[in-house]
């Protein structure tokens, strides 16, 4: 689900599970029978909680992280790794205080939430089984859970856990306080060299981590990139990604403007599709639109296959060099991720800052 327009936690964002609906409704809670409803009025102490979250004083509770099991057969089961004494914990909606919506999508919604025991803030992605089954995307959801739950990198959005009931599947996700990169790009239209180079370094590092684990994302675009507390990038939405031991795939997916030539032409593709995508992204961040954007789909396809790449004068020479080395028709000719991080333009302009907790977690 692309939409995750999240801002900082504020008093009033999270509210207690009271039934009824008032003029200041912004809370969803669980009524008997499983129906979600609205409530009102914030609980006391949330001002303090908000400040603690923003100062990073709350760490992820071990009971929250690890895949849960339920008595019933899930619609989308994740890996059943046993990682410690908490690996058997099963969550329900009653374990959370549900707050304001962070985003809405075709299959459900994302809400700000707080786990009652630890007071840990998360984003709760609520998906409707009926809609998932209707669209035939059970496999895609299962893949998203299986992949994202096993990725731990400071620039990848964490999937802490999941649970489900008769009608819904719930994904417990890391909360990204600054929301979608796409919305920030819409506001400013373009990013400067420093911010774009920083994003490129973060992406290169995160994708190297993914590729080392044989994971291809395949749908890198502004809508699937979130921003953490310090503005650090968080790759999200692994619905189109694939864990392929052979790293060879032959299905078309992803976003039109970001599709590489090999996918349009129906050829086998590998992890190098992500190199193409970050080249397109770099161009869009600096220019304000994707490089092959055209009036019709056919014209966009034609320009992609021909790699009809044109730079406005505003794009710095160093950035042009990087983008040109990523947007190569032959996947083998694309600049490797390690060289993206080491590219002179990236090195000169990137101001990447890792959260303190991440400095010890990168392998």
Image (tube, rainbow, N blue to C red):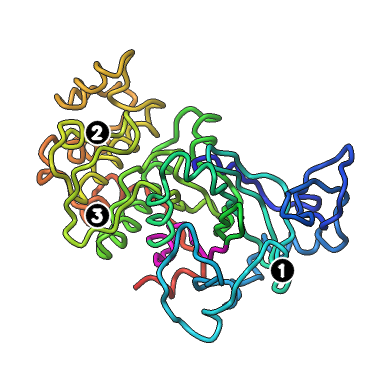
- Residue 28 placed where, x, y %? 75, 49
Q: Residues within 10 Å of mark 1 (few under 14, many from 20)?
A: some
Q: CA distance from mark 3 to mark 2?
A: 15 Å
**Of tags 3 and 1, which is closer to the observer?**
1
Q: Nearer the viewer, residue 239 or 323?
A: 239
Residue 278 vertical placement versus 336 (above, below) = above
Residue 339 vertical placement versus 161 (above, below) = above
Q: Is residue 237 left or right of residue 27?
A: left
- Residue 342: which disc? 3
Q: Answer yes or no: do the residues labelled 2 and 1 have beta carbons within 8 Å? A: no
Q: Residue at x 26, y 24 (%)?
A: 311
- Earlier sequence position, callout 2 versus callout 1: 1
Q: CA distance from mark 3 to mark 1?
A: 40 Å
**Of tags 2 and 1, which is closer to the observer?**
1
State the quadrant of the C terminus: bottom left
Q: Secondary structure at mark 2?
A: helix
Q: Which residues are magenta?
A: 147-163
Instruction: Tell me which corner region of the image, top left, top right, bottom left or bottom right, holds residue 193.
Output: top left
Name of the residue lying farthest toward the bottom: 85
The residue to which callout 2 is attached is: 320
Residue 232 vertical placement versus 283 (above, below) = below
Q: Is residue 157 magenta?
A: yes
Q: Is residue 46 magenta?
A: no
Q: Secondary structure at mark 1?
A: loop
- Earlier sequence position, callout 3 versus callout 1: 1
- Earlier sequence position, callout 3 versus callout 2: 2
- Residue 119: which disc? 1
Q: Answer yes or no: do the residues labelled 3 and 1 have beta carbons within 8 Å? A: no
Q: Residue at x 36, y 43 (%)?
A: 220
């Amino acid at each position: 689900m692309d939409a995750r327009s999240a801002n900082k936690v504020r008093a009033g964002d999270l509210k207690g599970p009271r039934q009824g609906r008032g003029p200041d409704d912004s809370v969803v809670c669980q009524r008997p029978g499983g129906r979600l409803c609205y409530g009102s009025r914030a609980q006391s102490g949330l001002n303090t909680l908000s400040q603690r979250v923003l100062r990073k004083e709350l760490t992820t509770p071990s009971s929250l992280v690890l895949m849960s099991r339920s008595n019933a057969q899930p619609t989308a089961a994740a890996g059943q790794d046993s990682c410690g004494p908490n690996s058997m914990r099963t969550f329900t909606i009653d374990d959370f205080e549900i707050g304001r919506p962070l985003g809405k999508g075709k299959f459900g919604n994302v809400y700000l939430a707080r786990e009652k025991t630890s007071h840990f803030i998360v984003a709760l992605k609520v998906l409707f089984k009926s809609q998932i089954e209707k669209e035939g995307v059970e496999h895609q959801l299962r893949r998203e859970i299986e992949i994202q739950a096993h990725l731990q990198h400071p620039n990848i959005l964490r999937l802490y856990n999941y649970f489900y009931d008769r009608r819904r599947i719930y994904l417990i996700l890391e909360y990204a306080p600054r929301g979608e990169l796409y919305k920030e790009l819409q506001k400013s239209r373009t990013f400067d060299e420093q911010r774009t180079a920083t994003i490129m370094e973060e992406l290169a590092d995160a994708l190297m981590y993914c590729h080392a684990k044989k994971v291809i994302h395949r749908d890198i675009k502004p809508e699937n990139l979130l921003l953490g507390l310090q503005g650090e990038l968080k790759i999200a939405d692994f619905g189109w990604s694939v864990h392929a031991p052979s790293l060879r795939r032959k299905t078309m997916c992803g976003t039109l403007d970001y599709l590489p030539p090999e996918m349009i032409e129906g050829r086998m593709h590998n992890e190098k599709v992500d190199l193409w995508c970050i080249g397109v992204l770099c161009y869009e961040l600096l220019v304000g639109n994707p490089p092959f954007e055209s009036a019709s789909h056919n014209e966009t396809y034609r320009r992609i296959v021909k790699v009809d790449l044109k730079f406005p004068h505003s794009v710095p020479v160093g950035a042009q060099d990087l983008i040109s080395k990523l947007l190569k028709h032959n996947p083998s000719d694309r600049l490797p991720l390690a060289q993206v991080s080491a590219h002179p333009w990236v090195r000169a302009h990137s101001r990447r800052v890792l959260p303190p907790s991440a400095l010890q977690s990168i392998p």
